[in-house]
Structures are given as C-alpha cells and as structure tokens.
Amino acid sequence: MSNQQIPNQYAIRVSNRAKYMRLTVSLDKGIVVVVPRSMSKRQLTQYIPEFIKDKQLWISEAIEKLQAKNIVKKTIDQCALPEIIALPGIGQVFSIDYQSESNSYCSETTVKLRHKTDFQLEIRGNIKDKIQTFSLLEQFFKRYAKYYLKQKLEQLSDELNLPYNRLTIRAQKTRWGSCSAKKNINLNYRLLFIEEELLDYLLLHELVHTVHMNHSKVFWAYLESLMPDARRRDKKINQAAAELPCWIHYK
C-alpha cells in the first residue's frame, strides 16, 4: 500500500454527459470529482466525501504515477555541456573534449562530433550552440544504442527462447519500449542511461510481450516466473526518466 498523502482539497465539475460520479487527477488541476447534473446539492454533500475516502488508494497511485512522469524540462541555458557521460545500462563512461572554433568565412560555424577513441568524444565548432551540440550527442548515442541494445536483446532472446522479429531504436519522450503484434520491438536509446537492472527488466518485459500482448495476470505471472522482482523494477523504471541527464531533456 502506498504512503502517498492524499490532498484534502478537491474540485467539483458538473457534467451534462456524466451518468455516475468519477474522478480525474492531474498535477495542475489536482483532484476533480465529475458529477452528473442531476445530483442535488444535498446528494453532493452526502456522497462526495465518502466517495473520495473510498478512492484514496486509487488517488494515491495516480498521483505517484503523475509525479514520476512529471519531468521538468530545463532551458538550454540551465543545461551545462557534459564533460562525462555515464551509461550505467552497459557499464561504460565517455569523456568529451570540447574545442571551440570560429570560422572567418561565416558569422557562425557548425558543430561536429568525432569519436576519437573507444570512450572519448571530441566536439568542435560553435559549442555555444547547445541545441546543435545536444542534437549531435543524441544522434551518436542512438547509433551506439543500436549495437549494444541489440546485442543484449538478442542474447536474452536466445537464452529464454523468446524470438522477436525486428528491433528499432528511437528517441521517444514518454515510452521506454514497445512490442507490436508482429513481434517488432522498439527501444528508447535512453535506456543506456538507466541502471542495468532496469534495462534488463525492460528488455525482458518487451520479449514477454511477444507471447502475451497485454498486461494481463497471465503476462505478469510469466514475467515474474522469469524475474521474481519484476514489479519492483517496473515501479522503479517509471521514476527513472526524471533522473536522466539534463541535456537529454533539452527539447
């Protein structure tokens, strides 16, 4: 059971279309009780407090999920150029060497990224252009993720005899991964930046979807037979997005 404290205040919205009382929860509007227009003031006074009390667990869980997904988007100026980039998911660390250059033939120069050694990058040019700099980092790590995530996914797929069709690497803002009915798996390159145990969980989660395409009890039973603490990891991965490096949230 959650220990999330439930706010005492809530708003009431009268709806012409509502047939029953229902709740909505958002970080900006808080708790809103939607009620049918047919309800009298006496009924509202009588039923709503008890309705809120009965729904406290649901409200608590809804607020936790919203807070976990509420990533504060920082401005470009607030994001420093990273000198070290850690990839906990695959146990690697990159260092970045910045070389500021000006071009006498134009007022602004482009930014270029070079992979100098195994774990060292060089970025040259107008490094004050953070949008372009961060975009280059994203492009590089998307390509990097395609190799390493595919390698880990194929190994797990072979070990558990859970074959998939095709892998695509994307830069999704709200989803870590997905699996289609054709057993095509999509993974977010940002998985490189979360803990290895969460990366392993997500890969297994999507592979189990090649057998069960929903989140039914059967799906969870199968997943937990392969990874007993799957639900703990699932809850933890929902909060991982808020801990990603600042430059990943630049757009």
Image (cartoon, helix red, strand yellow):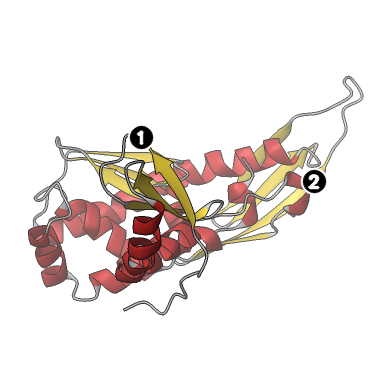
Mark 1 or mark 2, earlier in chain: 1
Residue 8 location, x and y as percent? 50, 70
Look at the numbered discs 1 and 2 and tell me whether their residues touch, using CB distance below 8 Å: no
Whether 156 is drawn above or below 77: the answer is below
Q: Amino acid at mark 1?
A: Asn
- Name above or below for residue 225 compared with residue 158: below
Disc 2 target residue: 99
Label annotation for residue 217 = none
Is 61 left, or right, of 181 in this rendering?
A: right
Looking at the picture, tell me which residue is in the foreground, 19 or 221: 19
Left or right: 47 in relation to 230: right
Which SS class for mark 2?
strand
The residue singled out by tag 1 in the image is 16
Query: SS class of the residue under badge 1?
Result: loop
Residue plotted at (46% across, 51% down): 12
Q: Is residue 102 visible?
A: yes
The residue sitting at the top extreme is 105
Q: CA distance from mark 1 to mark 2?
A: 63 Å
Q: Residue 236: x percent and y percent?
A: 39, 69
Image point (16%, 44%), residue name: 164
Quarter containing the N terminus? bottom left
For mark 2, does the 10 Å Cα neighbourhood hold few (<14), some (14 to 19), or many (20 or more) residues?
A: few
Residue drawn at 56 percent across, 54 percent down: 71
